[in-house]
Image (tube, rainbow, N blue to C red):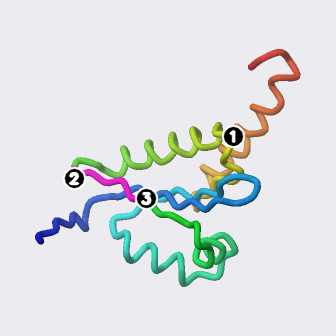
Amino acid sequence: MKTKCYCLNIRLYIVNDKKSDGYSVYVGETTDIVRRTNQHLGEIREDWAKFSKSNTTKMFVIGYHHFNKSLTLDIENRLMLYLLSVDNVSNVQNRRGILKINIIFLMSLMRFLPKFGVR
């Protein structure tokens, strides 16, 4: 069996785990999915420790040879915003500090707007 690997192409990855209150999701991007996954698993972080110990954790990798960094970051950002709108998703994580701040701001805004009749 022949396998093609575009190791220099950028990949988007989604890791999710089913919890009692919904799914915990991590969204990231990398040019080397094996190295990045091992890097995550070697870190001392609560989110990845839970992912590595759970029997329900799944990882999905999305890649295409025409992806570039800009497109991948745009897809990553939009995917995170979409996942925040899904009722079954209780937690969306990412390492980009600015993106986290934007997501926290948007979540706060979405909770605040209904008080003024905006849906």
The magenta-colored residue range is 60-65
Mark 2 or mark 1: name the one nearer the start of the chain. Answer: 2
Q: What kind of secondary structure does the magenta stretch mostly adopt?
A: strand
The quadrant the C terminus occupies is: top right
Q: Position of residue 114 (x, y in %)?
A: 82, 23
Q: Which residue is mark 1?
A: 87
Q: Which residue is mark 3?
A: 60
Q: Position of residue 32 (x, y in %)?
A: 34, 70
**Label 2 residue SS:** loop
Q: Which residue is mark 2?
A: 65
Instruction: Give the CA separation, mark 1 to mark 3.
Output: 20 Å
Mark 2 or mark 1, which is nearer to you?
A: 1
Mark 1 or mark 3: name the one nearer the start of the chain. Answer: 3
Q: Position of residue 105 (x, y in %)?
A: 73, 41
Q: Residue at x 47, y 63 (%)?
A: 59
Q: Position of residue 78 (x, y in %)?
A: 51, 40
Q: Residue at x 32, y 58 (%)?
A: 10
Asked if residue 1 lies left or right of residue 107, the reply is: left
Q: Residue furthest right?
A: 115
Which amino acid type corresponds to the residue marked 1 in the rendered image?
Asp
Q: Are marks 1 and 3 in contact (CB under 8 Å)?
A: no
Which amino acid type corresponds to the residue marked 3 in the rendered image?
Phe
Asked if residue 44 lies left or right of residue 69, the reply is: right
Instruction: Give the CA separation, mark 2 to mark 1.
Output: 33 Å
Quick one: label 1, few (<14), some, or many (20+) residues within 10 Å?
Answer: few
Rendered position, 33 above or below 68: below
Query: Does the magenta-highlighted stretch encompass residue 9?
Result: no
Mark 3 or mark 2, which is nearer to you?
A: 3
